Image: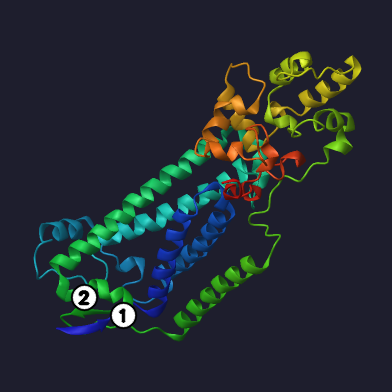
Amino acid sequence: MMKSYIWSLPTRVFHWLFVVLILLAFLTEDDDLLNYHALIGYGILILLAFRFFWGYLGPKYSKFKDFPTGMGEVKEFIANIFSSEQRYIGHNPLASYAMIGILAVVFLTIITGVLTLGIQEGKGVLSSLNSTFFKEMELFEEIHEFLSGLLIALIAMHLLGVLSDRLLHSKDKTLESIFTGYKVTKEQEGIKLNIFQKLFAAIFLALFLAFLFFNLTTKSNPLIASNYVPLDYKAQNELFVNECASCHTLYPPHTLPEKSWVALMGDLENHFGDDASIDEADNRNILDFLVKNSAENSTQEVSVKILNSLKNKDIIAITQTDFWKTRHAKIPKKVFAHENVKSRANCKACHSDIEKGLIEDENIKNINAYM
């Protein structure tokens, strides 16, 4: 038996960068880490591009054509899986399918993630699709989550395969090979990179490092830039601001549907326990503004999800919607009782941009300040 150099340095670097970024992608799935999650996805896309070309231009065993994926090879592998004589210099048949599956599913997950970011959040390179497909935003999110779950299953299968190979064929040093590049083989089967392959790998590594540098040093990043801009409600309707913001948070019109605004403005004498009556002409002015900019006329995520959660319910308070209750279910009661919050309706205590018509996840204040 002899040691053979099977996995080149570029192949091993790709593998471990891929592992790290996939792990970080799952760790940043929270809404308040969405921008980091998206940027990690773009980083993985660069790695996938490298692996795709490396599968055709790389050395032996890293090329897709060297993957033993024939049905005869799969049957033979399964039939002799417990045999100590069974050895594959590169990937075995099942590992080949697992690897191809992981690469394909990761690619589709990233594509649906970019679509979800653009359509649901109005951010990134596909933010222009928000105005066209915003009503289907939940569909794209569900597809993205399904693919993420499928990826976890494939990774689990891959790890199970590594473990079984470790138990059944420990002499081959397959697990160690992804660290060292060497496997134990019957004959000398080493690979060697040519100058073109080295140059190609170096260019992609430089591209990846440039991507990291760009994201660490650029504030206005087009990959995650929002299609929505802060609104100056005072410039749009000064009366709306003066009358509504004098007593409570200035709730953006797109946070409630038309019928809710009509009901609310039609009973200001009983405005959550207070008499907030105003001149009839002023009432009509504000109502027209609210209706014109209501949830039905918005493509923002919060508008669509509030509308979907309302169904046929007659609700005039955001905090009474199922959407609001679900999103705030895990927040401790003492946060709302804090002296700087005092009420569930005090949205601006946490959402620093709400009075500018935005409810961006990255602008939510850390609730630990109210704990």
Residue matched to label 1:
180
Residue at the outermost front position: 339
Asked whether residue 359 appears in the rendered view, the answer is: no
Q: Is residue 276 left or right of residue 176?
A: right
Asked whether residue 282 appears in the rendered view, the answer is: yes
State the residue in front, 315 or 231.
315
Residue 155 in picture, x, y percent from top left: 33, 56
Q: How is the image coloured?
A: rainbow
Q: Secondary structure at mark 2?
A: loop
Mark 1 is surrounded, within 10 Å at the Cα level, by few (under 14), some (14 to 19) or many (20 or more) other residues, namely some
State the residue in front, 337 or 3.
337
Residue 58 in picture, x, y percent from top left: 40, 75
- Residue at position x 22%, y 84% in the image: 3
Residue matched to label 2:
173
Q: Is residue 69 left or right of residue 338?
A: left
Compared to residue 231, the image places residue 316 above or below, namely above
The quadrant where residue 237 appears: top right
Quarter of the image where the N terminus is located: bottom left
Residue 128 in picture, x, y percent from top left: 68, 45
Cβ–Cβ below 8 Å for labels 1 and 2? yes
Q: Is residue 206 left or right of residue 170?
A: right
- Residue at position x 39%, y 74% in the image: 11
Residue 32 in picture, x, y percent from top left: 57, 49
- What's the distance in space between the residues labelled 1 and 2, CA to CA? 10 Å
The residue type indicated by label 1 comes to Thr
The residue type indicated by label 2 comes to Lys
